[in-house]
Image (tube, helix red, strand yellow):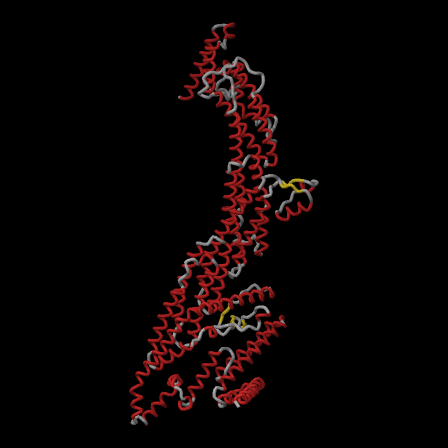
Amino acid sequence: MAENETLECITEHERILQEIESTDTACVGPTLRSIYDDQPNAHKRFMEKLDARIRNHDREIEKMCNFHHQGFVDAITELLKVRADAEKLMVRDITVTAQTEEVIRCRIQQRNMATTVEKLQLCIPVLLDVDTQLDWFCSVFCRVSQYRFCQIMAENLPRLREEIKEISMSDLKDFLESIRKHSDKVGETAMRQAQQHRTFNSAVAKQSSIGHYTKPVYSLNGQTHTQNGLMINDDTGDEEEADEEILTAQDLVDFSPVYRCLHIYTVLGDRETFENYYRKQRKKQARLVLQPQANMHETVEGYRRYFNQIVGFFVVEDHILHATRGLVTRAFTDELWNMALSKIIAVLRTHSSYCDDPDLVLELKNLIVIFADTLQGYGFLVNRLFDLLFEVRDQYNETLLKKWALVFRWIFELDNYSPIPVETEEEYKLVVSRFPFHDAEIEKQDFPKKLPMSQSVPQIYTQVKELIYASLKFSESLHRSSTEIDDMLRKSTNLLLTRTLSSCLQNLIKKPHIGLTELVQIIINTTHLEQACKYLEEFITNITNVSPETVHTTRLYGLATFKDARHAAEGEIYTKLNQKIDEFIQLADYEWGMAESDGRASGYLMDLINFLRSTFQVFTHLPGKVAQTACMSACKHLSTSLMQMLLDTELKQISMGAIQQFNLDVIQCELFASSEPVPGFQGDTLQLAFIDLRQLLDLFMVWDWSTYLADYGQPTNKYLRVNPATALALLEKMKDTSKKNNIFSQFRKNDRDKQKLIETVVKQLRSLVNGMSS
């Protein structure tokens, strides 16, 4: 019998559904009324049938939209217009829609409150309908108040009221206790819907070539309201997930304890107590939700759980705000959110500062964006979160710079600092595809051939582009203009060039194992990297479509970075050359008391000159001025070192034979300078580095003191570069030698007064030195 009734009921419901679908909307009221006049609980089964029919229609509509993709948006727009009319009809004619079960229950409660107390015969519905039936109940009660059962009821009413309040409050406490467990799931669902909407919105923007962003406004009924009036089901996954029903807050949380307790306390005149209690407890729960785990910064899942709990909390509060009348107010939720926002920002600042993994920082940024978009859809202000992202971006850049510093150091460690050899056309194309190198002369050469830079140059260039890509990833989804993104990319690149790469180059140049050959190659490398900076500018421009001629466009500072590195390398070349010269000078072993010279230059000096000659041959690839400066610096340092050797205070005596031997060495230095070891010097410019030594030695070799003293101070003096103090110091060393070794015995053959000449010259030189000092 029951089965037959059920079958008849199903058949009747099917007929009603067909009638609703086919009839005019003005005639729907009587049709729906017939449902409630039927068997008890028939309306519940009808609502289940109606829900199933609506879901079937929704699935058919969605499949049709997916099949006709080109007309998808238009079809959705038309559908939404129909649904908007349906919502208006629901409010005007008290009809039932398929949007949410909560709306259905509210409508059922309204109809139940219109029926009589005798038909319902349930205690709780009596309390639920006491607002509408209070006058009727009082009039009846007055007519039967003389009976004893009425007096007993009147005496028990206060106690019953308290018991009802206690029971409902107990249910509320259980609800508050369990809501934290559900908040995580609610938050996860809401953030997933926000992410799906972002994906869908991005796809539509790409297909339509429209770069604007549609701000989402989410609701708890599993749909998304956007600013242009569209309502789109968020389940836009693949076909396997198309039929899956999206879980909403009502699916995950049973709000009936809140509604029931609120209604009971309102009827019993104690609504304010209930509101204060609820708000106080939710504030406490908010503070608990905002407390992060100590190790949250270690994994992205830690951040995800933190955001899910917060989103779930505020989604529930937003639902309570809209589903109840005054239990929470917008001012209360805004106050909660502002408190939470300050705490969230402080937590994220602290925990993100611990992170040294750029990939984790990037995932955190994506979570913050989805978190902000989700809550913005519920009407919460999230501008401060997007401001926080600028701080997170700085942290992201710092982690990138640290990572790239290791990459650069590794590249420099593996570099052989030799020109890149290319054996075939394919190898050549591979190199120029990674680095913008163009040289007409080299292109004309036959294979195999060598490119001037070493292998680190294309690797460095590639890594700079990789950092630009990494920076671009952070700029995505921030709702920033192309100009702002262009500025972000250029600033990140500038930091990489001026801080990280510059520091790595400076440290490389100072390393002890970096010799002259490596320094020469570093100078060549930085020259090519400097020339490639314009291609990095073009690379960024192609990404952002922002012209570099734009007024506010930031320029790349790579030119200064590579120039500074090149200058440091040049200075290090001069230093190392001088150090090498000093090493050879330390090998000098003159016999300062020798009677006559060996007739050939010293071995250490010839080795030194051969070293300089081979070194300057390597300098042929350097810019002209660098090679010339290095050569001139080396010759000056050699000249100064030789002069210091003669004037060393520890050298007490020196013979004329030693002077002659020393002169042979200086002649070799002059011959080296005149051989043009580095092209570009004019005339005898390089030989002038030894002019002080040459004039001093000529003065002693010729013994031309009369000319020196007579022409001293005159511009035409042939010994103009000889300082009297220098001549005096060397002459006194020779005077001491003549007394002991009879070096000047040849003068005695001519005239014994020659000895007096030396004394006279010494006196005159001292007079000149004293005159200069005074």
User: Toward the viewer: 267 or 623?
Assistant: 267
Q: Quadrant of residue 351?
A: bottom left
User: At 55% across and 23% down in the image, what residue appears?
Assistant: 604
Which residue is farthest front? 1
The tally of labels here is: 0
Q: Is residue 131 visible?
A: no
753 lies above or below 167: above
86 lies above or below 536: below
User: Residue 598 appears at what percent x and percent y?
Assistant: 57, 16
User: At 43% across and 86% down in the image, what residue appears?
Assistant: 112
User: Residue 634 appears at what percent x and percent y?
Assistant: 54, 29
Q: Quadrant of residue 469?
A: bottom right
User: At 53% across and 59% down in the image, what residue appears?
Assistant: 476
User: Residue 748 appears at what percent x and percent y?
Assistant: 50, 6
User: Toward the viewer: 664 or 295?
Assistant: 295
Q: In the picture provided, is 439 more to the left or to the right than 392?
A: right
Q: Is residue 3 visible?
A: yes
310 lies above or below 615: below
User: Toward the viewer: 52 or 81?
Assistant: 52
750 lies above or below 552: above
User: Residue 699 appears at what percent x and percent y?
Assistant: 52, 16
Which quadrant would the C terminus be assigned to in this image? top left
